[in-house]
Image (cartoon, coloured by chain):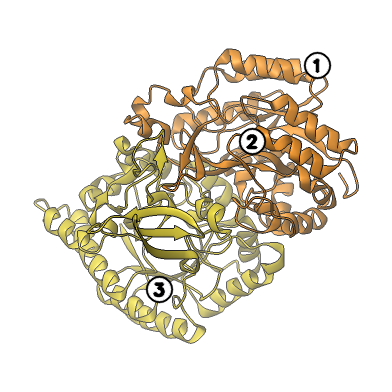
């Protein structure tokens, strides 16, 4: 089982490589990828340097061009695919049928990975992408139980990669318009969820309010820890009850407890979420998961899972972790 | 349908978990409504089985006899192997055209050489993607709900061979999850949901802490609280080349909604119809997406 780590910047890439990632994934500094945040991602020069450094240490580099271009901006996505091919990345991560079509025809030697943003949750969908675009790997949305992951992996024509740690999307990726509905900007079209440009913090008589484009996503009393206002993690009213986390609490996904089950399920790679996080986060998470995956693959028993969980908890959103949909009861 | 034609009207699949009697009564009534296309089937949750596919086929026969084009819609989120099995038989056995709401369905229908409708969750945002779907057998496509007039117009003119369909009335489908939020609201897990969504014929409204209606819970699906109402935008929908206007079923006043959009086709004033339909929305209307804004925006007037 391979470890794939986020590289939102050159320092993060270096940390991931040093801490033992088998591969890192990156993106250009624009809306062509799903982590389009100010100050994040790579210029052409940084990327060239990052790829050279990673390759020198035996680490592969994937590049995400995984948002959905529209007619007016199509050429920017074509250009991004061309640049990825020229840079010699080890794989292009894409979601849009048009982008996959272009990449597979124009650059047949460039390996394609199906992005989680393509919402492919079953073997029949993966077979479609494989048949038409010769994808070599697919990243599964965070909505499947371990048993379902095993089913998909067994029937899939390509190896599957799953999320092992990081922010938890509770909706099928690529089919979530919550941010779009509130702000007009979605992961699909713009590459960001609750974009910082639309977030406002305001202290009022009722507490600290977090608004996204005017929509009140949460309100914190004194002493409460305020989290980033992702819509699915907000507190809302339902049936007149006191505000609560109607969709999900602020929590992170963590799978160190079930890595052996994921390996058994036939998972080829574990992905860490967090290109928008700091280089220190990348180092900490990569180190722990490297250790945990190595122990799991070597079949070592008595793994210090508690210690790993503690080290991961210190960098988790909301300082809580969950198995999410991997655990059937989550649903 | 060319840019100057009169669009047809469709009824989207019922997104909610209505009783069998309510579903039967709804489609019995719809036989006499001025809709041209009716989509049938469960698109949200595989646990909802008050009607089997054979029941939908029978309803379809009755609607077809009343002159409607019938389309059978597939599940949107397919997780378990059993759901995939159900999808394969549905695509094989359906006597009617199928609406593919997941790429799995596209793959099966392509293999079976069956023409299909490309549903709104396939994420078809550009001409290259549409051409691919056309090659796989798509005859019509439904615009992803977050796209607006500008993109719709560009795509219908770029791929004129594919008929387009645009959601003109209804709560917007915004997200799907492995979790059932209605069950969660009842402090139940999805496996032990007790079919709580059956008590919400129009979903359950979620409000922000300052009391604004924001979302609607519908089992594993999250919808907008506001109803998208594009009646005032009827001329722009025609200009964008919409071949079909999609109306999403709700438990009340659906006949009036259909009548309103039919009146538009017969020359009624768009602003007036929009105003007449506004009270039928439940908690309010929106039309932001069509105008290139946030979906929840109400009363947007220019692209």
Mark 1 is surrounded, within 10 Å at the Cα level, by few (under 14), some (14 to 19) or many (20 or more) other residues, namely few
Which numbered disc flags the more N-terminal residue, 2 or 1? 1
Residue B281 image label: 2
Chain ID, mark 3: A
Seen in the picture, residue A96 relative to B252 is either above or below; the reply is below
**Same chain? Circles 3 and 2:** no
**Same chain? Circles 2 and 1:** yes
Chain ID, mark 2: B
Q: Position of residue A108 (x, y in %)?
A: 60, 66
**Front residue of this view, candidates A326 and B224:** B224
Q: CA distance from mark 3 to mark 2?
A: 43 Å
Corner quadrant of residue A295: bottom left
Q: Which chain is orange?
A: B
Q: Position of residue B4 (x, y in %)?
A: 91, 48
> Secondary structure under badge 1?
helix
Q: Is residue A161 visible?
A: no
Q: Position of residue B274 (x, y in %)?
A: 75, 41
Residue B65 image label: 1
Query: Going 49% across and 82% down the picture, which residue do you hit?
Result: A43
Q: Left of A198 or right of it: where is A257?
A: left
**Front residue of this view, candidates A259 and B149:** B149
Corner quadrant of residue B282: top right
Q: How many marks overall?
A: 3
Residue with the mark numbered 3:
A8
């Amino acid at each position: 089982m391979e470890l794939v780590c986020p590289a939102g910047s050159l320092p993060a890439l270096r940390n991931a490589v040093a801490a033992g990632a088998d591969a890192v994934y990156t993106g250009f500094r624009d809306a062509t990828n799903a982590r389009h945040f100010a100050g994040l991602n790579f210029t052409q020069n940084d990327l060239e340097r990052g790829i050279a450094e990673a390759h020198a240490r035996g680490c592969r580099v994937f590049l995400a061009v995984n948002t959905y271009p529209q007619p007016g901006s199509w050429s920017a996505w074509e250009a991004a695919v061309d640049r990825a091919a020229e840079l010699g990345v080890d794989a292009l991560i894409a979601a849009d049928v048009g982008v996959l079509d272009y990449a597979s025809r124009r650059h047949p030697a460039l390996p394609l990975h199906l992005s989680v943003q393509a919402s492919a949750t079953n073997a029949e969908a993966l077979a479609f992408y494989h048949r038409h675009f010769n994808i070599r790997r697919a990243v599964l949305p965070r909505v499947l139980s371990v048993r379902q992951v095993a089913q998909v992996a067994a029937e899939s024509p390509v190896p599957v990669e799953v999320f092992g740690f990081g922010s938890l999307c509770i909706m099928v990726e690529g089919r979530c318009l919550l941010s779009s509905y509130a702000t007009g900007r979605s992961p699909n079209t713009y590459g960001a969820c609750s974009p910082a440009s639309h977030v406002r913090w305001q202290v009022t008589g009722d507490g600290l309010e977090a608004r996204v484009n005017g929509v009140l996503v949460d309100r914190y009393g004194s002493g409460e820890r305020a989290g980033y206002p992702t819509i699915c993690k907000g507190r809302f009213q339902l049936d007149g009850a006191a505000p609560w986390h109607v969709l999900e609490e602020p929590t992170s996904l963590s799978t160190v407890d079930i890595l052996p089950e994921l390996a058994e399920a036939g998972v080829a790679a574990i992905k860490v979420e967090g290109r928008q996080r700091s280089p220190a986060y990348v180092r900490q998470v990569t180190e722990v998961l490297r250790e945990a995956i190595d122990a799991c693959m070597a079949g070592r028993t008595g793994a210090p899972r508690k210690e790993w969980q503690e080290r991961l908890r210190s960098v988790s959103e909301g300082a809580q972790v969950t198995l999410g949909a991997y655990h059937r009861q989550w649903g | 349908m060319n840019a100057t034609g009169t669009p047809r009207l469709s009824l989207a699949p019922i997104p909610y978990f209505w009783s069998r009697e309510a579903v039967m009564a709804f489609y019995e009534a719809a036989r006499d409504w001025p809709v041209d296309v009716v989509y049938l089937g469960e698109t949200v949750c595989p646990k909802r089985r008050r009607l089997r596919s054979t029941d939908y086929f029978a309803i379809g026969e009755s609607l077809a006899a009343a002159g409607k084009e019938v389309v059978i819609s597939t599940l949107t989120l397919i997780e378990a192997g059993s759901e995939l099995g159900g999808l394969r038989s549905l695509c094989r056995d359906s006597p009617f055209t199928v609406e593919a709401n997941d790429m799995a369905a596209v793959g099966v229908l392509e293999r079976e050489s069956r023409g299909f409708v490309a549903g709104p969750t396939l994420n078809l945002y550009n001409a290259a993607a549409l051409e691919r779907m056309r090659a796989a057998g798509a005859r019509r496509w439904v615009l992803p709900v977050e796209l607006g007039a500008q993109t719709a117009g560009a795509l219908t003119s770029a791929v004129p061979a594919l008929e387009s369909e645009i959601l003109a009335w209804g709560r917007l489908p915004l997200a799907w999850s492995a979790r059932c939020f209605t069950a969660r609201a009842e402090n139940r897990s999805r496996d032990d949901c007790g079919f709580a969504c059956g008590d919400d014929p129009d979903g359950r409204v979620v409000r922000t802490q300052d009391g604004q209606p924001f979302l609607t819970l519908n089992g594993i699906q999250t919808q907008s609280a506001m109803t998208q109402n594009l009646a005032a935008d009827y001329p722009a929908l025609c200009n964008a080349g919409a071949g079909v206007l999609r109306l999403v079923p709700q438990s009340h006043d659906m006949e009036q909604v259909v009548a309103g959009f039919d009146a538009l086709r017969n020359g009624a004033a768009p602003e007036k119809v929009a105003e007449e339909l506004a009270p039928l929305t439940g908690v309010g209307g929106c039309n932001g997406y069509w105008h290139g804004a946030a979906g929840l925006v109400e009363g947007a007037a220019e692209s």
